[in-house]
Amino acid sequence: MEDQPPSLRLEQLVHHCMVNNLSLILACDTNSHHPSWRSVDTNHRGTLLIEYIATTNLEVANRGSEPTFCAGNRRTVIDVTLISNNLNTIIHDWQVMSNDTMSHHRQIQFAIKCDKRKAVRYCNIWNTNWDDYDAELCARIGMWFGRVDTPADIKRGLDAVYSVIQKSYHKACPERWISGRNRMPWWNHDLKVLRQKANRAFHKAYKSGLGQDWQVHREVRRSFKKLLRQSKRDSWRNFCSRVEDTHESSRIYKILGRTQAGSLGMLCTPSGQWTTSPEEVCQHLLETHFPGCKISTVPAQDSDQCSFRAGTHRNAVPVLFLMTGTPFRSVSV
């Protein structure tokens, strides 16, 4: 936040959510002290912030007095979670975690009742044991020959073969529960060991408050961060090397489609308004990065297919636009 909270951008965001009846969760490093979030004292920033909160539909979600900021023996509560008042019934278990975050700010965790994805059973074809599949299929079918005299016999025979194939496949590739949580490709055993070592050093220093214990913790944390950066770089290099032989458009799709991090959210326009739809986001991005471009609507041949249109910026930088849906929008620059 700026020197005089709240910032103009924050006021605009809160106003937009209030006008459009949108729920909002804000996790703020406020540098503000006030008893409303269990600080032991009050400063000018805290007074300004609590006065602003009183004019909105926001509420403080902090619970307890556990410090959220810990730099050596300096401990205070300056990290504040603000939520819309209509979220009070679904947000619970707000707490400051005891594990080391490799930062002076400690991890804050809370649960949203409606955000847990339901686990599903899923067959991963890449994990199929094809030797078991062949053996099971041969054992079930063998030298079976059915008598075929009428179309009904054909249908009955096909149903039998289909059933055998399905049962053989499910035995060779059993369904497993998928919770929706993906393992990070850069995480490894060495990082896990260093993370545990850093946690132990943090807990020891937090309890003792001795300078030598904090020094040990800083050294372990520095080693963890160094190994983490190296692991991420190596993982990215390996991923890039695996897609070098892939078609350009497929390569972009693989890179951007690995996670949901590439999804576009709300953007603030020069007028101070926030975008409310993917179309407005694309419109704003085009106007910002390609000023003077013209957008024309061309009917797509098949709404279920993705359409590609390549454009070229005036600086001769090739640009690839991927649009889906019934209206295909092409861009001329």
Image: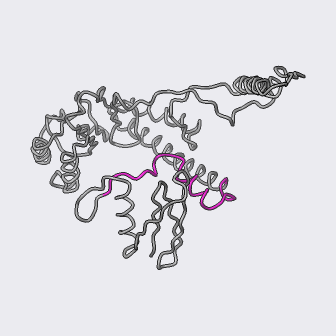
Q: On the picture, is 45 further left or further right than 287?
A: left
Towards the viewer: 131 or 278: 278
Which residues are drawn in magenta? Answer: 242-267
Relative horizontal placement of residue 170, taking residue 220 as reference (left or right): right
Q: Name the foreground residue: 137 vs 8.
A: 137
Picture residue at 49% right of the left edge, 36% below the top? 195
The residue at the point 47 percent across, 55 percent down is: 326
Splitting the image into 4 quarters, where does residue 153 fall?
top right
Q: In the rendered view, does 214 fall on the left or right side of 136? A: left
Above or below: residue 244 compared with residue 315: above
The x and y percentages for residue 40 are 15, 34
User: Which is more toward the observer, 205 or 193?
Assistant: 193
Residue sitting at the far front:
150
Q: Is residue 3 above or below residue 27?
A: below
Q: Residue 4 appears in which quarter of the rendering?
A: bottom left
| Residue 248 sits inside the magenta stretch | yes
The residue lying toward the viewer, choosing from 159 and 67, is 159
Q: Where in the figure is residue 65, as x and y percent of width and height?
A: 22, 29
Q: Residue at x 36, y 63 (%)?
A: 283
Count of numbered circles on the image: 0
Quadrant where the image shows the C terminus? bottom left
Q: Position of residue 274 (x, y in %)?
A: 27, 56
Taking the magenta stretch, the answer to whether it contains residue 295 is no
Image vertical order of residue 284 relative to residue 118, above or below: below
Q: Position of residue 59 (x, y in %)?
A: 18, 36
Look at the image and name its color scheme.
one colour
At horizontal 40% and vertical 53% (from top left) the residue drawn is 264
